[in-house]
Amino acid sequence: MKYLMRRLAFMLGVLAAVTFLVFSATNVIGDPLFNVVGFYVSVDCDAVIAGEIEDVIGTVAGTGIGECERVIEAREKYHLDDSLPVRYAHWIGGMVQGDFGDSYANQMPVSSIISERLPKSILLMGMSLVVALGVSIPWSVAAAYRANQPLDRASTAGAFGLLSIPGFALAIILFYFFIVRWQIFPSRFMDDNIFSRLHSLVLPAASLGIPLAAVYQRLLRTDLITTLQEDFVITAKAKGLSDRRIMFRHVLRPSMFGMITVVGLNMSALIGGTIIIESIFSIPGFGRELYVSAIRDDITVVLAGVTILSTAFVAINTGVDLLYSYLDPRVRRAG
Amino acid sequence: MAGTLLTVQDLSVGFLTEQGLVRAVEGVSFDLEPGQTLGVVGESGSGKSVTAKALMNLLPSYAQVGGTVDFDGRDVFAMAANRERHFWGVEMTMVFQDPMTSLNPVKKIGEQIAESLRVHLGRSRGDALAEAGDLLEQVGIPEPAKRLSQYPHELSGGLRQRVVIAMALACGPRLLIADEPTTALDVTVQKHILDLLDDLRRARGMAMILITHDLGVVKGRADEVMVMYAGHTMEEAPTATLFAEMHHPYTEALLETIPRIDTPSHTRLVPIPGRPPEVIDVLDGCPFAPRCRYSIARCLTDQPGLTPHGAGHLCACHAPVGTTSGTQARSANELAGTTAAGLDMGQFTRNVPVADLGQSGAAG
Amino acid sequence: MPADTNEHTVGTLGKFATEPAARPADAEPDADRAAQRRLGITFWVCIGWILLVTAAAIAAPLLPISDPDQIGIGPRNSGPTWDQWFGTDGNGRDIFSRTIWGARVSLMVGFFSIVAGFLVGGTIGIVSGYRRGWIDLTLGFITYVMLSFPTLVLFLLVIMLFGQGLWIVTGALSIVVIPSVARLARAITIAFAEREFVSAARLLGATNRRVMVREILPNVLIPMSALLLLGLGLTIVAEGGLAYLGLSVADGFSWGKMIQMGAGLRTLQTAPWVAFFPIGAMFLTVLSLNLAGDRLRQYFDVRELGIGSR
């Protein structure tokens, strides 16, 4: 329990650091006002509202009363007159309550964007992981069982090939064959029901999952072969247990540590890959939105995105550590 | 022989390596009656473990096995070829040397014992665990119920070995093979484990093959002893006979290496000079000849077969200890200063008068 | 010697040999060692390809190939012909030439970013792993923060700040590389710092810095240099992805940019080679780096531990 507390504290510390860094960077480098309203102000809006300066609608952007009203609103809402740390505090406070601010480009609260788009991205990542694990585990077992024989050598060559293809390249290749030539899968995301969604995500998940599967397979295969050399495997054989039972019940679990570590660390790669894949397959997910928002300096969305991504990364890696202690009882004592 | 539990005839095991065929075991034969203990003694590389693994179907695929093994009328190798599922671990089980590495570190002890019961005897999980608890008690582990949910690293070496024994006994085997069961343990614990094995054997009417490099271990605990060297059987006899009148020079040398409690202090330990042969070398004569005090010219060219020397006593030697030919060979060597194989007799620090041979070095 | 041996293969786990103990201890696998010393033909083929691509990239201005930016050098979107070996793109530019020129950016960014990453990350890792204490904790925290920072966002921030010059992009990519390298170097350092020869050096009065440089560094360099090739593969791919999103070097193009230009639905339908040739080039290069890097890793690993391979 104490261990858990310490890990959580560490997690929060990291998140605080990351979010503060991004917040400061975007607010210091860019214009904090532009970040939230999306246009520059070239006049003194207080004066315009007070009627002291002529309302020059339609000639210069950022000088109309309508826009100035928005500016005053934004100043209040986002505490733009306060110092950076204060603004940061307000932002965190709002976030904890679920208020991420508004996206100027989409003219809607960021939280709605998130709730609309994030599930799709999560679905994609989940499917990719399922593909990666579902392919790599049986593959590793088969390869380790026949180590150094023709099948194994061939599969190692194949694994290298697959992990050398960047995700986006594989995506384009799959896109070409399965969508353009053979038209098995739709060219854009079909949102009708859960089945059409899954169907649309098959190729994207494969593009992300298959190179990952190759990476995992190499790791798991090596660890399986090492574990198979252990004495307790001989004991199990001496007990008359079948090869299948020994492999799946005795050997697999202790061999998974290396692979699980990499799964955790690769999370950021997976997330980054999701952004590109969503672009290629036109999936309206959060990754694509994040990218697009970043290009147009829709900072509220970017900040929300960074927070979510970092939280996910840290949470997953903490989960991986906890998983260790579950899988290997020898670690529990130390933890 | 009717009623014999295990009959091994002419067992040989070779390993196909890049350097050629490694002959690990050659022409080993023995019988085992129900409830009997056979001690198999030899140095590392003598082939004793490989013999056990051949019986237990634990050899790798690059092993070539010859001969026959018959367990209560069943052909063991045929069972292996047919992938018989419920023989090993049930009728014939094995205990290994290092209890820390032979237990699965990430599984609870109770589970590991219960596994045999569930897989072979179809017990339910609850029943199997309960029986596992009983087994732990039988092997003398305190607080058995608590141990069931512990992991191997939480126990001491001696306790772990008891767990390994419990695991081997789970399905009521008729033959237990113990390969150096105490070598990895503290000296004080060794006796307890050996006694435990003895008690269990008697209580269950189980036969046992006790493999060790230490001749002292089998004295008083084995009914018969087989001495192996370089994959061959050198001598085979009922224990008492072996210690009273051993005939093979190797056996004699082994006995001499055992330190005795009544020798004066600062007496040098007696090693056997030389090293066991590289098992790849194809030997023409007796494999022990290069290190043997009794070797004569014939030993280098003619491999001796096992000849009987009385009831149940076999010895593979051209100049056995305690016979006229043996005594002559040794004195001739001592006079000449070297053996037929070129071994310098001066290496032997123990000056046992030739006349006293025959009762030499019988350990305590 | 038995006259005829019945050849039963009483096997263990399938065909898999799980019995190193059964092999005689003295039978030194000389054949294995020799195989280990030779890096193998695959390795050299891969190195050959890498060198070829590098040479071509460096020598691009001198090679007798067409101008990569020249529009209309051939018919638009035409496939491979004798004049244009890789065909042309939508603007009629020679893809073969562009592939070679694109290699310049891809390789330069990839190479310098991984080298910088190794230098900085390696230093951090060694210092962290050797000194431990609060230095380790602080550096560890910073490293972890860097690791959890979403890569893309980092790039966007950097680009917002400093633009998209070649060295900016390279620098940003090396920042991404640093935390992973640091972790690795730290782990290796810790493993070594506990060995006797380090204690011996300290007993002889070596300062911390001297120990780190003289004792630890050489031992860390060896396994890590094997990973350099693998890392280079990763950075090339990373640059490719960024270029695809338009976040890479603005002045000039890399393989990733070429892929992006060829990946539109229409282009794929009519002229798939526009994307496929750069994909092929990247794939072969990364594959060679992975195969060679892995072979090197095996080579050093085994020698390190002093055991023959199985």
Image (cartoon, coloured by chain):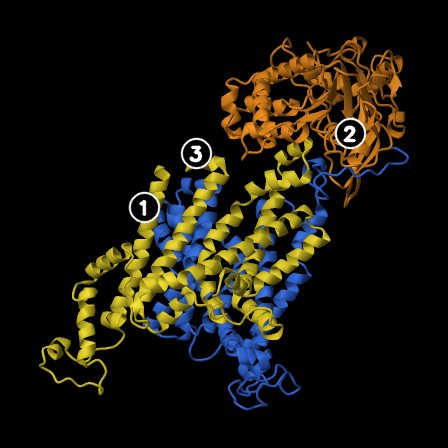
Chain colours: A yellow, B orange, C blue
Along the horizontal axis of the image, is B256 left or right of A91?
right
Q: Residues within 10 Å of mark 3 (few under 14, many from 20)?
A: few
The answer to whether residue A311 of the structure is visible from this angle is yes
Cα–Cα gap, marks 1 and 3: 20 Å
Residue A333, label in figure: 3
Q: Is residue A82 left or right of residue A306?
A: left
Whole-percent x, y for residue B95 in the image:
66, 25
Residue kind at label 2, given as amino acid type: Ala
Q: What residue type is disc 1 on?
A: Ala
Residue sitting at 37 percent across and 39 percent down? A3
Q: Nearer the viewer, mark 2 or mark 1?
A: 1
Residue B33, how many percent across, how many down? Answer: 79, 16
Using the image, determine if residue B100 lies above or below residue A253.
above
- Of A245 and B249, the residue lying toward us: A245
Disc 2/disc 3 C-alpha distance (Å) = 46 Å
Choose mark 2 or mark 3, whichever is in front. 3
**Which one is nearer the viewer's eye here, A18 or B26?**
A18
